[in-house]
Image (cartoon, rainbow, N blue to C red):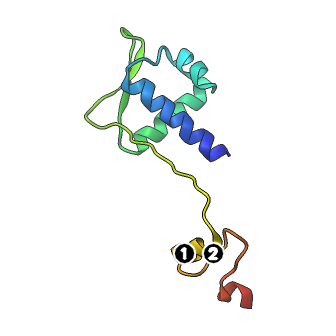
Amino acid sequence: MKAVEQLERLKRMNKLIKAENTGTPNEFAQRLGISRRQLYSYIELIKDMGVLTAYSKANRTFYYCDEYELEISCTLKKISREIAKKVNGGFSNHFGVSSPQLAAS
């Protein structure tokens, strides 16, 4: 569930940055339950997506620099194998069902 935890952390970061209510880098990292180094890794990830952030010493918060921000969403839901086959064109490795090419190998 690491991926879900990371998405939830990014969502929380986004919310705090949008509200300009992060606190200092140490406080922000602590609020997220990560190290300061990990915090800057997440900020670098956000930057790599084309969304620039900066830190204001006067306001003690990170903020978005331009008109862009993140929209983060994730949906997990249980589906039947039959629906999965239709979605994946009849082939699905997600449920242990292999394609004819893989079965022949």
Left or right for 74, reference 3: left
Question: Which numbered dot is residue 99?
Answer: none
Which secondary structure lies at badge 1? loop
Q: Give the residue type at disc 2.
A: Ser
Quadrant location of the C terminus in the rendered image? bottom right
Question: Which numbered dot is residue 88?
Answer: 1
Q: Is residue 105 visible?
A: no
Q: Position of residue 59 (x, y in %)?
A: 37, 10
55 is higher (above) or lower (below) than 100? above
Q: Mark 1 and mark 2 in contact? Answer it, CB < 8 Å.
A: yes
Q: CA distance from mark 1 to mark 2?
A: 6 Å
Snapshot quadrant of residue 27: top right
31 is higher (above) or lower (below) than 45? above
Q: Position of residue 6 (x, y in %)?
A: 58, 40
Snapshot quadrant of residue 37: top right
Left or right for 89, reference 81: left
Q: Residue at x 61, y 75 (%)?
A: 82
Q: Is residue 68 visible?
A: yes
Question: Which numbered dot is residue 92?
Answer: 2
